[in-house]
Image: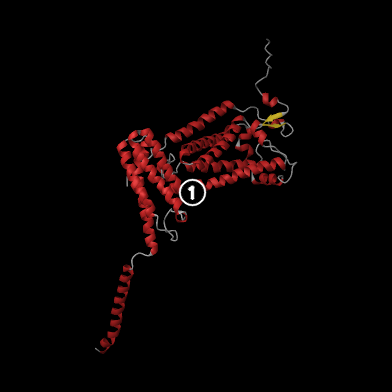
Amino acid sequence: MTVPPTPVTTPVNKVAQDQAHRLIWDLPLRLVHWSIALCFAGSWITAEAGFDWTETHFTFGYCTLGLILFRLLWGLVGPTHARFSSFLKGPRHVWRHVQHLRQAGGPEAPGHNALGGWAAVILLTALTVQAGTGLFLTDDIFYAGPYNPMVSADTASWLAGVHHWSFRVLQGLVATHLLAIAWYQFRLKQNLVVPMLSGKKSAARVAASDAIQSSALWRALIVALVAGLSVWLLLYLAPEPIVADYF
Amino acid sequence: MRYLTNLQPLKLTVVASLVLTATLSVSAIAEGPTPAEQAQATADTRQGLFKIIGRYFGPIVGMARGQIPYDAAVVEYNASKINQLASMSTDLFSKDTSEFDLETGALPGIWKNQDDFNAKAATLVETSAALAAAASEGKGPAMKAFGKVGGACKGCHDDYRQQD
């Protein structure tokens, strides 16, 4: 029995050397994207599922906070297309992109386009409001968010209103996100789903100079540790809930 | 002297109007609370009932979280109080106050689907009785029964309590 020889590959710039495809979205960014989608679906389902699922709902919320924090930090120190500085453009750029939305054939941004970049920021903001307000809420029965004891009942009730309304906003934003993907697919002939799964776009769509060199996994690990520890600390520092045994 | 007598009718008018005003105000007080005030008082009483339920509920929540040690006697006692209080809830909601603009979280659906509301209130009566019975079986079974009490609360809150 002969062992087939292992093909020799140079790990450095392996992806960049791939002539057919270019790496655009790093692996951590993709994992965070799909994990946020999972948390969104999970917290929606557990909110509907009733009393017994409240703790799972909380867990999805904490994970969302960690993922948002990771994404914000990654927007500062991640690879090119993950960075806010690379995709947040002024109104003129946004307007120019809007004008290209009518039909296929316009220029394609390697990462977020001028409009999509702001869409990501808006989605992240809405998610922050959603998960952040959750920390202060109570069901007035059994469960309370870790920071509920810090606010008055009136404030908690007001924040519950924000939590419920921001979810509607978030539903609208997610629907817009999905419709936009469909629009790019069918009208503009740009597939955005596959690159968010594989990380790669074909060489026909993206110039070699726009490819990122690696997913920066070690850096991602450090950022993930920072984000995870921050959420852990947030929960660890939460005040002890009050035992309501007074009239 | 002459003008003093001239003042007489004026004096009389002043006195008469003062007496009339006083009588009117007394009768206004004697009229008692308006229907809206009665309805608000009803809402206040209902909220009081749930505050008392909350008082007996709280320590069991503390035990469930492990903040205070499990005490079967307290659980049994508090659960039986919740059971008694729960049985009063349908009485307090028997009067439809939905036509008044009240400070309340009670939704009009309570009186539109009163049978369903009463059935949900009965769930709290049943589950709290079950909790009182399970208290002596230890923390595990008691907390399982307690979860059902919480579920009964939520089952009704979801449909009939105003969400912000």
Residue lying at 31% horizontally and 78% vertically, measured from the top left: B17
Q: Could you say where residue A91 lies in the image, as x and y percent from the top left?
A: 65, 46
Q: Could you say where residue A187 lies in the image, as x and y percent from the top left?
A: 72, 43
Residue lying at 30% horizontally and 37% vertically, measured from the top left: B73
The N terminus of chain A sits in image quarter:
top right
Q: Quadrant of residue A33?
A: top right
Q: Could you say where residue A235 lies in the image, as x and y percent from the top left?
A: 44, 35
Give the left or right position of residue A139, taking residue A105 as reference.
left
Is residue B135 positioned above or below B7 on the image? above
Q: Could you say where residue A52 lies in the image, as x and y percent from the top left?
A: 46, 38
Q: Quadrant of residue A31?
A: top right
Residue lying at 67% horizontally and 15% vertically, measured from the top left: A6
Q: Is residue A244 visible?
A: no
Seen from the viewer's position, the closer of residues A104 and A45 is A45
Q: Quadrant of residue A218?
A: top right
User: From this viewpoint, which residue is outermost toward the bottom?
Assistant: B2
Q: Is residue A236 visible?
A: yes
Q: Please count the marks in the image.
A: 1
Give the left or right position of residue A24, taking residue B41 as reference.
right
Seen from the viewer's position, the closer of residues A105 and B162 is B162
User: From this viewpoint, which residue is outermost toward the left?
Assistant: B1
Seen from the viewer's position, the closer of residues A225 and B160 is B160
Circle 1 chain: A
The residue carrying pointer 1 sits among few (fewer than 14), some (14 to 19) or many (20 or more) residues within 10 Å by Cα, namely some
Residue type, numbered disc 1: Gly
Q: Of helix, strand and loop, which one carries label 1?
A: helix
Give the left or right position of residue A93, taking residue B99 as reference.
right
Is residue A212 positioned above or below A119 on the image? above
What colouring style does the render use? secondary structure
Is residue A105 positioned above or below B34 on the image? above
> Which residue is denoted by mark 1 in the rendering?
A161
